[in-house]
Amino acid sequence: NSKWHTHTVKVLRKIKHEMKSRNADEDDEEEIAKDAQLSYNKLISGVNRRTAAGVFFEMLQLKTWDFVELNQEKNYGDIVITPGLRYDDKPGS
C-alpha cells in the first residue's frame, strides 16, 4: 500500500522484534520471551536526536493506524508502547 513509508515499516519491524504479539502462541518460545510493552527510551537507545525524532513521528503514524498504543504518564516522561488492535496485521493491509 502506498501510504506505508519505508521508515514506518522499519520502525514497526523494530518494535515487533522487541515486543510480544497480541496473539502470541504459547508454544512460540521466542515470541513468549519478548516484552508485553516497550519503552520509547529503550527503542531509541544509542541513536542521534534526528533519528529519535523520526522514530517518534513514525510511532505517531502507527498509533493513528491502531498498530500501537502509546501512553505517557507525565510531561517529558518516557512513552510506553503496547500493541494496538492491528498490531498483528501486515503493514498496508
Image (spheres, helix red, strand yellow):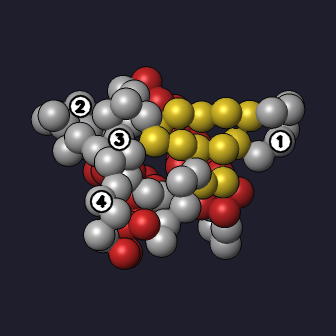
Viewer-nearest of discs 3 and 4: 4
SS at mark 4 in the image: loop
Which residue is depicted at the point 67% across and 72% down? 46
Q: Quadrant of residue 35?
A: bottom right
Q: CA distance from mark 1 to mark 2?
A: 30 Å
Which label number is shown at residue 3? 2
Q: CA distance from mark 3 to mark 1?
A: 24 Å
Whichever of labels 1 and 2 marks the residue nearer the N terminus, that label is 2
Percent position of residue 73, x then y: 80, 33
Viewer-nearest of discs 1 and 4: 4
Question: Which residue bears the numbered disc 3?
Answer: 87
Percent position of residue 88, x then y: 29, 44
Question: Which residue bears the numbered disc 4?
Answer: 25
Viewer-nearest of discs 1 and 2: 1
Three-letter code for the amino acid on which mark 3 is drawn: Tyr
Q: CA distance from mark 1 to mark 4?
A: 32 Å
Tell me the crowding category of disc 1: few under 14, some 14 to 19, or many 20 or more residues within 10 angstroms, Cα based. few
Q: CA distance from mark 3 to mark 4?
A: 15 Å
Whichever of labels 3 and 1 marks the residue nearer the N terminus, that label is 1
Whichever of labels 1 and 4 marks the residue nearer the N terminus, that label is 4
**Residue 91, above or below 51:** above
Q: Could you say which is closer to the camera, residue 23 or residue 51? A: 23
Image side of residue 38 versus residue 17, left or right? right
Whichever of labels 2 and 4 marks the residue nearer the N terminus, that label is 2
SS at mark 2 in the image: loop
Q: Could you say which is closer to the camera, residue 89 or residue 75? A: 89
Tell me the crowding category of disc 3: few under 14, some 14 to 19, or many 20 or more residues within 10 angstroms, Cα based. many
Tell me the crowding category of disc 4: few under 14, some 14 to 19, or many 20 or more residues within 10 angstroms, Cα based. few
Whichever of labels 3 and 4 marks the residue nearer the N terminus, that label is 4
Percent position of residue 26, x then y: 34, 63
Q: CA distance from mark 2 to mark 3?
A: 17 Å
